[in-house]
Image (cartoon, grey):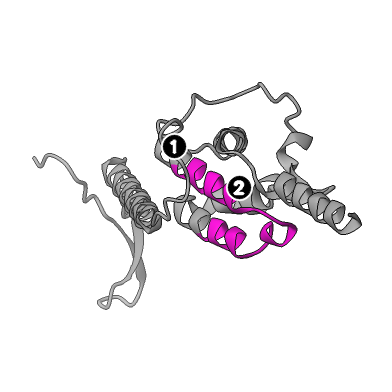
Amino acid sequence: MKKMMFMAMMMTIAISASAMTYKKANKEALFLSDKMAYELKLSSSQYEAVFEINLDYIMAVNKKADISGSYWKIRDTNMRYVLTANQYRAYHATPYFYNPLEWTNGKVGYKVYAKYNNRNKMYQPVPNNYKYYKGGGKKDYKYFANNNNDKKNKNNNKNNGNYNKNNKNNNNGQNNGKKPDTPKRQFGNSQTNNPSNGNNTTVQNHRSFGSHK
């Protein structure tokens, strides 16, 4: 009898810990993703991808070891693909995004509620895939990394173009500006030696620039 009661109790604990319904997981993934979109300034496509990644992770957690185990590593790898370098740094520095789950009293807890305690407050419209994505898609998000690199290269090229354009404008400004005055030759009295009489004589130089008579 005691053995049967013990087994029933263990089954109850296992069910409460692992059997999260899709509806519950979907709601938690949406709340977390909404706050990530708000703080990290995600695009609509990033928001959809982050929602999928979070839903897959939450649905996969069945026990305490899963919180920081292989499912978390998959989540983090996918986040690296989806987020830009600056977004990932912000995500990594935010504990309720980077390690969003905790194990409390035999069940999963969500760290994000420590900051966002109003569970009805949403900052973004629901992503387009909210109703039809059921989790477990095992999608490849590497194409986001390629897109992010393309955007980075495009921005670098744009910045280089602006730099070259500014240099050209600066050079044109210098060339179009007023040229500095060149010092004029001074013409006046000069001392010359007169070899005929051995005396120094002063010769007045009347040379001038302009009209000649």
In which quadrant is the C terminus drawn?
top left
User: In this view, which residue lies farthest toward the front?
Assistant: 1
Is residue 186 visible in this depiction of the protein?
no
Judged by its main secondary structure, the magenta piece is helix
**Residue at position x 83%, y 55% from top?**
4
Could you say which is closer to the camera, residue 198 or residue 145?
145
Residue 2 sits in quarter: bottom right
Numbered range of the magenta stretch: 49-77
Residue 179 versus residue 186 in the image, above or below: above
Closer to the chain start, of discs 1 and 2, is 1
**Residue at position x 10%, y 42% from top?**
212
**Measured from the top left, where is residue 186 in percent x and y?**
34, 53
**Residue at position x 48%, y 44% from top?**
52
- Left or right: residue 165 versus residue 14 is left
Task: Inspect the magenta stretch and tell me whether residue 60 lies in it.
Answer: yes
**Measured from the top left, where is residue 92 in percent x and y?**
64, 54
Residue 33 versus residue 136 in the image, above or below: above
**Residue at position x 47%, y 45% from top?**
135
Which residue is the site of mark 1? 43
> Could you classify mark 2 by the number of other residues whose Cα lies within 10 Å: few (under 14), some (14-19), or many (20 or more)?
many
Q: Secondary structure at mark 1?
A: loop
Could you say which is closer to the camera, residue 46 or residue 63?
63
Task: Inspect the magenta stretch and tell me whether residue 112 lies in it.
Answer: no
Type of amino acid at the residue the image marks with label 1: Ser
Q: Secondary structure at mark 2?
A: helix
Type of amino acid at the residue the image marks with label 2: Ile
**Measured from the top left, where is residue 165 in percent x and y?**
30, 47
Residue 144 image label: none
User: In this view, which residue lies farthest toward the right?
Assistant: 2
User: In this view, which residue lies farthest toward the left?
Assistant: 213
Residue 58 image label: 2
- Left or right: residue 124 versus residue 146 is right
